[in-house]
Amino acid sequence: MTAEQTDDNPLSVSAADSDGPAALMVPVGISNRHVHLSREDMDTLFGSGSSLTRLKAVKQPGQFAAEETVTLKGPKKEINHVRILGPLRSETQIEISVADSFVLGVDAPIKMSGDLADSCPIEIIGPEGRVSKSGGVIVAWRHIHIPCDMAAKYGLTDGQEVSVQIEGDRAGIMQRVMVRATETSALEIHVDVEEANAYGLKNDSLVKVVK
Amino acid sequence: MTAEQTDDNPLSVSAADSDGPAALMVPVGISNRHVHLSREDMDTLFGSGSSLTRLKAVKQPGQFAAEETVTLKGPKKEINHVRILGPLRSETQIEISVADSFVLGVDAPIKMSGDLADSCPIEIIGPEGRVSKSGGVIVAWRHIHIPCDMAAKYGLTDGQEVSVQIEGDRAGIMQRVMVRATETSALEIHVDVEEANAYGLKNDSLVKVVK
């Protein structure tokens, strides 16, 4: 099947199933542990009316890594220098790895960003104060950011789970990868550091959607 | 296909391909970073004629975690309290994770245990001395230990690569898993901590060989 045929059948998933040139190849973005802050928690941690300082842009439009970092304090240990990602959000959310959850001594569920039901508590320490969150800590569910028009072209829908084929010494089929289709997304699969290392992935490695 | 039929066809791989009761289910053993020492390096690090103290047995017969630990010193940083696994071996071998390789600043290849070609250098520091190894550091290639008779029953051969299906939130098909069949093996799939966390595995989780 060619890309042209796919264009004629926008709801077909055959393009992504094919080994041909029309397969959807997705560049990898590796997420290290990070924090999204609410306005209220930003005030507490960095001072009333404080703002984030842009360190560098990340691939998703409008988002950036900030110069500011915080300390996460769990029942067991602390992790320092945890990067904040901007801009501010309506709710504070802390994304860590499974290894981090053992270090902190917390039982963080694997959840999509924004789904904070059953997320676990943590204390966040900043230069101007600290906040005890009753929830907000998750291990991020791996996901593919994709613009809506491209998703439609490949027969993918927001909220769908797909599999991706990864080649190399640590080859595997990563299953249950969530599709996140929005108008402003840049095409990218987000995995955490442990997923990247376990599958032999680097930033901008290409992986193939296989269903 | 039933287990009885499989016994009648010892070279068939159908049992492992099947979804039926005869599928080969393998318990998980998670390897943290560790060191195997030669007699010569043991002498240098812990004193001439010193011996390892058994802390606890591991699943593979005759092998054990020792009370003794060493420090690994790379070009970038050190990692302390790295466990030694006994007994002593003919060659010193250091098994680390990909994350550890970034911390140490070394470029460790993914290799089967014992395959030290192209392995990378490291300094090992013990209580009585230090050794600079010109090689010996690897990231272990994931593998299944299996007794020869069981391997034959499931149509598996030493050195073969197989795939395993893993279920759960981080479901996936782990490909290129090496079969290590020896007379004295205990059935177990060895993965490192990052592989375990990326696939949602715990010690003694069961995974299914799918080809």
Image (cartoon, coloured by chain):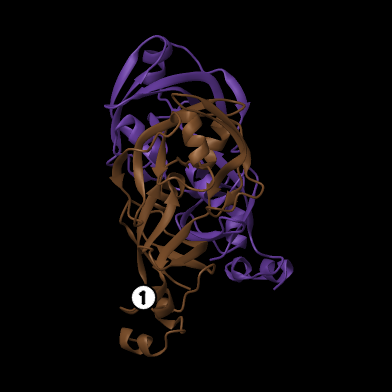
Chain colours: A brown, B purple
From this viewpoint, is residue B60 visible?
yes
> From the viewer's perspective, is A145 left or right of B183?
left
Q: Relative to residue A191, is residue A92 depicted above or below? A: above
- Where residue A14 appears, as percent x and y from the top left, is 44, 82
Along the line of sight, the residue nearer the viewer: A28 or B38: A28
Q: Relative to residue B91, is residue B20 depicted above or below? A: below
Q: Residue furthest front?
A: A49
> From the viewer's perspective, is B85 left or right of A86?
right
> From the viewer's perspective, is B26 left or right of A167?
right
The residue located at (72%, 70%) in the rendering is: B2
- The quarter of the displayed image where residue B169 is located: bottom right
The residue located at (44%, 67%) in the rendering is: A182
> From the viewer's perspective, is A63 left or right of B17?
left
Along the line of sight, the residue nearer the viewer: B92 or A50: A50
Q: Residues within 10 Å of mark 1 (few under 14, many from 20)?
A: many
- Where residue B54 appears, as percent x and y from the top left, is 59, 21
- Where residue B89 appears, as percent x and y from the top left, is 44, 29
Along the line of sight, the residue nearer the viewer: A147 or B101: A147
Along the line of sight, the residue nearer the viewer: A59 or B110: A59
Q: Secondary structure at mark 1?
A: loop
Q: Which residue is mark 1?
A: A23
From this viewpoint, is residue B94 visible?
no
Q: Amino acid at mark 1?
A: Ala
- Where residue A129 appears, as percent x and y from the top left, is 50, 24
- The quarter of the displayed image where residue B152 is located: bottom right
Q: Relative to residue A191, is residue B64 depicted above or below? A: above
Q: How many marks?
A: 1
Q: Quadrant of the N terminus of chain A?
A: bottom left
Q: Chain of mark 1?
A: A
Q: Relative to residue A26, is residue B100 depicted above or below? A: above
